[in-house]
Amino acid sequence: MKIKLTSIFVDDQRAALAFYTDVLGFTVRHDIPLGDASWLTVVSPEDPDGPELLLEPAGHPAVKPYRDALVEDGIPLVQFAVDDVEAEHRRLTDKGVVFTQPPTDAGPVMVAVLDDTCGNLVQIVSEKAPA
Amino acid sequence: MADVYRALDDETRRLILDELAARDGQTLFEICTVLLTRHRRTSTRQAVSQHLAVLEEAGLVVTERRGRSKFHHFDRSPLAEIARRWPTPAEDDP
């Protein structure tokens, strides 16, 4: 068993695609029209055969209260590994990305939390170089 | 005024104020992260949330909604009451 795909709910699939590709830097893996929505997945260009992230429409009525409560408390729904959280924070802030939590020393890792503009908070994580 | 003395009578709540004094304006998630990683406090989010409610009642923490998230700020003004009640002699007094 292995993790091949995981999903997050997004307010608008096209806006999400733009954010996850143009801003964060992922690439489209699948974009298959299915009626009103699409089977829309992105992957990391560093790992094109790796796990896919499905950007799923947030239409179910349970999604809004669930996400609102998490976002209010600053709790991320998805986490991505980066080489250097502080460098990513600078790069993304320059692109206008809003962080709810700046780079924070969390023991063996640095973390930061950003708003994906599609209804979710995203945590980025980098391992600290061994002292 | 809600009881400042009771609010301060707890090490986790004092650590929360320490962390807000170091960096003001944190979400519940960030406060939980620093309590866990810097202070090895394994309190649940619910417990931390209750600590924040006590601090807020005492006026030591105020919350502000920015975007869709809620940020906690340290308000030191209730501490002034303690200093007024038991003033410390100024250092330049004879």
Image (spheres, grey):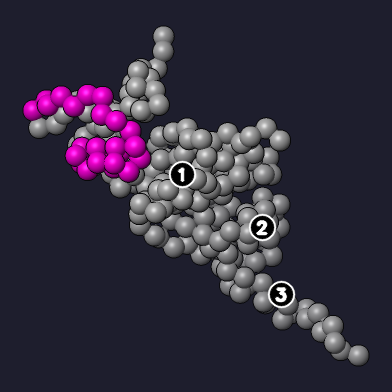
Q: Residue at x 57, y 69 (%)?
A: B75
Specify the quadrant of the image occupied by residue A108: top right
Q: Earlier in the sequence, mark 3 or mark 2?
A: 2
Q: From the top left corner, tell me how far across and down residue A17 is, in percent.
A: 24, 37
Q: Residue at x 71, y 58 (%)?
A: B9
Q: Is residue A27 magenta?
A: yes
Q: From the top left corner, tell me how far across and down residue A79 is, in percent.
A: 44, 34
A20 vs A109, left or right, is left
Query: Which quadrant is the C terminus of chain B positioned in?
Result: bottom right
Q: From the top left corner, tell me how far across and down residue A128 is, in percent.
A: 61, 36
Residue extending farthest to the left is A35
Considering the numbered disc 2 on the image, is that residue within a helix, a strand or a loop?
A: helix
What is the C-alpha distance between the residues marked 1 and 2?
27 Å
Task: Report the residue marked by disc 3.
Answer: B82
**Front in this rendered view, residue A124 or B31:** A124
- Give above or below for A7 relative to A19: above
- Chain of the residue under the numbered disc 1 shown in the image: A
Query: What amino acid does circle 1 point to?
Result: Glu
| Label 2 neighbour load within 10 Å: few <14, some 14-19, many 20+ | few
| Label 1 neighbour load within 10 Å: few <14, some 14-19, many 20+ | some
**Front in this rendered view, residue B42 or A111:** A111
Q: Which residues are magenta?
A: A12-35
Task: Report the residue marked by disc 2.
Answer: B18
Question: Mark 3–mark 2 contact, CB under 8 Å?
Answer: no
**Front in this rendered view, residue A6 or B11:** A6
What is the C-alpha distance between the residues marked 3 and 1?
44 Å
Q: Residue at x 67, y 50 (%)?
A: B12
Question: Is residue A112 among what the camera can see?
Answer: no
Disc assigned to residue A88: 1
